[in-house]
Image: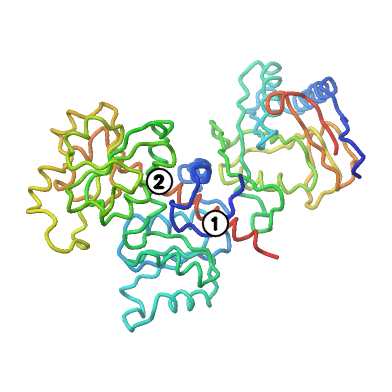
């Protein structure tokens, strides 16, 4: 197949074949990070902008390192220290940066659809690093990459995504990628944190972690996003942990080869116990390592697609 | 022209003899005690490299390691429109240290020299060989860079617009070189 997309805005619109192509490409990038000279030239002379309107540790630094490994130049934009404080809009910000000559924009914004909006209004390639509750495609990709690398395939696997699913763009991107690759996905959490009309999504829904934990091959724990919650979705943090936290005790009833995942950052002791997060089933840090190869692949592919449009 | 068919210019027997000859020349050139390894450029260079590696191992009486090099990341045409083909990034698999070794870089066809340039840049990022020698099955006209093969098998004077395609049993089911 031929990769023709100069933007990566979400996984919902990608085919299983396209997702597989990104994962296969990422395999070829892994060794750039493990060999002695951690650089290759395909994006030499290209400028990548990290346009982040929300905080980030993993995604931002991962994209910065990925761009550097491909020999691109990177500009770091943080909302806090920018002219957004003076009222400058998203579009004006992007257009002003574009006037300085940029090739790829990696954007994280609290409004769903922000990346799609940008892709229609600027000439550069746009990669969605998280838009509101909508999607976080590179996280979805690195999650399935991690699973595929260890389990060989996602076809037929049972996967649970546990926590604040309603406000989770990671859960949505994961859902699209995992179901397209043949896995059965179950959202687990309290009813107050389930997305409205979840029954219309290609997933199962459960309000009982104890029932689900025994049956799944992969469990992805989501952080309670206190900064996004409105009101009181659960009586207390302790009660939430009791019913939906991944404890060492619950792990005893899980399959021996279950994969424990978390997009980070972890609230230790809240949605996951330290013992589990650091335990032998945990692949949380491998997700981060794989994220680098996946993001290199995405940067490479959108750049290639953009090159096709040169006359 | 549309009525010209694909023509076989080398059959499997001829290819076999050419490979024997290449191996022979490498053997007489390289001292027996050298730390020698072959590295094939994806995707047909790797087949040739494997075959050369076996022959060299037989002759030198020791293991001659063989690696696979993917040059996609080092190509100089990534920012140009690609037309029909789109290069896919694949893995480089070199399970040995290349520092200080005699590396026989192997490719199926040498024409413009751009693939070899990319391969050398890729190798330099992996280490510092003692010496790199280039061995190719088919040596065509049409260099765009000042690059030559140390060991070339078959010299072809095919016109630049013709495609010379090398096929091997391992990758295509049959050993032959065709021109179309």
A37 with respect to B153 (left or right)? left
User: Which residue has dot 2 on it?
Assistant: A142
Respond whether the residues carrying marks 2 and 1 are from the same subunit.
yes
Q: Locate residue A169: give its quadrant.
A: bottom left
C-alpha gap between disc 2 and disc 1: 17 Å
From the viewer's perspective, is residue A39 above or below residue A253? Answer: below
From the viewer's perspective, is residue A177 above or below residue A55? Answer: above
Looking at the image, what colour scheme do you see? rainbow
Res. A302 mark: 1
From the viewer's perspective, is residue A156 above or below residue A60? Answer: above
Res. A218 mark: none
From the viewer's perspective, is residue B115 above or below residue A95? Answer: above
Quadrant for the C terminus of chain B, please: top right
> Residue A161 location in percent, x, y?
27, 43
Q: Nearer the viewer, residue B71 or A291?
A: A291
Q: Locate residue A284: give its quadrant.
A: top left
Label 2 crowd bin: few (<14), some (14–19), many (20+), radius 10 Å? many
């Amino acid at each position: 197949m031929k990769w023709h997309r100069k933007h990566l805005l979400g996984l919902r619109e990608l085919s299983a074949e396209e997702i597989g192509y990104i994962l296969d490409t990422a395999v070829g990038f892994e060794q750039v990070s493990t060999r002695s000279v951690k650089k290759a030239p395909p994006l030499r002379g290209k400028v990548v902008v990290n346009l982040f309107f929300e905080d980030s540790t993993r995604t931002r630094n991962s994209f910065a390192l990925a761009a550097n490994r491909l020999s691109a130049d990177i500009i770091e934009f943080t909302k806090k220290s920018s002219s957004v404080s003076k009222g400058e809009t998203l579009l004006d910000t992007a257009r002003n940066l574009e006037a300085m000559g940029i090739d790829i924009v990696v954007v994280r914004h609290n409004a769903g659809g922000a990346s799609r909006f940008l892709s229609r209004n600027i000439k550069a390639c746009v990669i969605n690093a998280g838009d509101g509750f909508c999607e976080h495609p590179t996280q979805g990709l690195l999650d399935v990459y991690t699973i595929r690398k260890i389990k060989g395939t996602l076809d037929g696997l049972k996967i649970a995504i546990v926590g604040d699913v309603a406000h989770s763009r990671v859960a949505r991107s994961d859902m699209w990628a995992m179901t397209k690759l043949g896995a059965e996905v179950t959202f687990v959490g309290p009813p107050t944190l389930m997305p409205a009309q979840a029954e219309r999504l290609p997933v199962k829904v459960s309000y009982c972690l104890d029932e689900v934990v025994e049956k799944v091959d992969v469990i992805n724990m989501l952080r309670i996003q206190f900064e996004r919650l409105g009101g009181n979705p659960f009586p207390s943090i302790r009660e939430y942990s009791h019913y939906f936290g991944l404890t060492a005790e619950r792990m005893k009833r899980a399959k021996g080869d279950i994969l424990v995942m978390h997009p980070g950052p972890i609230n230790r002791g809240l949605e996951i116990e330290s013992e589990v997060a650091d335990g032998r089933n945990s692949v949380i840090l491998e997700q981060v390592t794989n994220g680098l190869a996946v993001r290199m692949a995405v940067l490479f592919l959108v750049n290639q697609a953009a090159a096709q449009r040169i006359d | 022209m549309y009525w010209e068919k694909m023509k076989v210019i080398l059959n499997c027997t001829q290819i076999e003899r050419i490979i024997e000859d290449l191996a022979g020349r490498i053997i007489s050139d390289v001292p027996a005690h050298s730390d020698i390894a072959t590295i094939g450029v994806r995707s047909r260079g790797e087949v040739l490299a494997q075959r050369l590696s076996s022959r060299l191992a037989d002759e030198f009486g020791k293991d001659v390691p063989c690696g696979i090099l993917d040059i996609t990341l080092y190509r100089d045409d990534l920012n140009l429109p690609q037309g029909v083909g789109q290069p896919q990034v694949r893995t480089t698999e070199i399970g040995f240290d290349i520092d200080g070794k005699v590396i026989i870089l192997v490719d199926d066809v040498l024409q413009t020299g751009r693939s070899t340039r990319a391969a050398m840049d890729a190798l330099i990022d992996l280490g510092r060989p003692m010496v790199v020698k280039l061995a190719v099955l088919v040596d065509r006209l049409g260099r765009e860079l000042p690059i030559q093969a140390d060991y070339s098998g078959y010299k072809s004077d095919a016109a630049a617009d013709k495609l010379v395609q090398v096929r091997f049993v391992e990758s295509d089911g049959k050993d032959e070189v065709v021109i179309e």
